[in-house]
Amino acid sequence: MPKDRNSVALRKVRHKRVRKKVSGSTEQPRLCVFRSLRSIYAQIIDDSTGRTITSASSKESPSISPKTAASNVVGKMVPERAKSQGITEVVFDRGGYKYHGRVKALADGAREGGLKF
């Protein structure tokens, strides 16, 4: 990759590429991940109506020192909240990030909590 390009802009290009293929519906909404330097956020979104059904972030729980462990906790919080809305299956949207590290930990936590994708 060229070093003169901004990494945020490159991530947005990758995210657009992923979003062309991934779309959430009422039966199978989209689990969207956003990763900042300090926190990680997850939302379950119904793209047909354009509304967020439920969300979770690492800011809600007490601080957990390794960020991958915090991501796993957020991944386990999402299915608990989704089950109250009657959601068991989702489509995973990695948000332009590599499926590695904190994003993978969040996905593994969501699977352990009972979400299927």
Image (cartoon, rainbow, N blue to C red):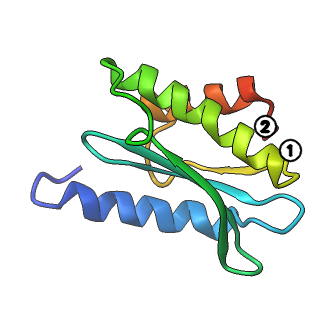
Circle 2: is it few (<14), some (14-19), or many (20+) Cα within 10 Å? many
- Mark 1, other Cα within 10 Å: few <14 / some 14–19 / many ≥20: some
Numbered disc total: 2
Image coords of residue 65 (percent x, y): 30, 18
Three-letter amino acid code at the position of disc 2 = Leu
Disc 2 to disc 1: CB gap under 8 Å: yes
Residue at mark 2 to residue at mark 1: CA–CA distance: 5 Å
Name the secondary structure under disc 2.
Answer: loop
For residue 44, above or below residue 50? above
Q: In the current view of this chain or complex, which residue is farthest to the left?
A: 4
Q: Which residue is mark 2?
A: 115
In-image side of 8 versus 4 (left or right): right
Residue type, numbered disc 1: Thr
Q: Quadrant of residue 55?
A: bottom right
- Specify the quadrant that holds the C terminus: top right
Q: Residue 68: image x %, image y %?
A: 41, 23
What residue is drawn where x is 28% and y is 65%?
9
State whether residue 75 is above or below residue 8: above
Q: Regarding mark 1 in the picture, which secondary structure is present there?
A: loop
Q: Is residue 37 above or below residue 54?
A: above
Q: What residue did someone put label 1 on?
A: 88
Give the residue displayed 49% in from the left and 54% down from the top. Answer: 95
Residue at (59% x, 66% y) in the render? 19
- Residue at 59% x, 34% y is 75
On the image, the x and y values in percent for residue 7 come to 23, 54
Give coordinates of residue 98: x percent, y percent.
45, 39
Query: Horizontally, is 43 left or right of 111 in the view?
Result: left
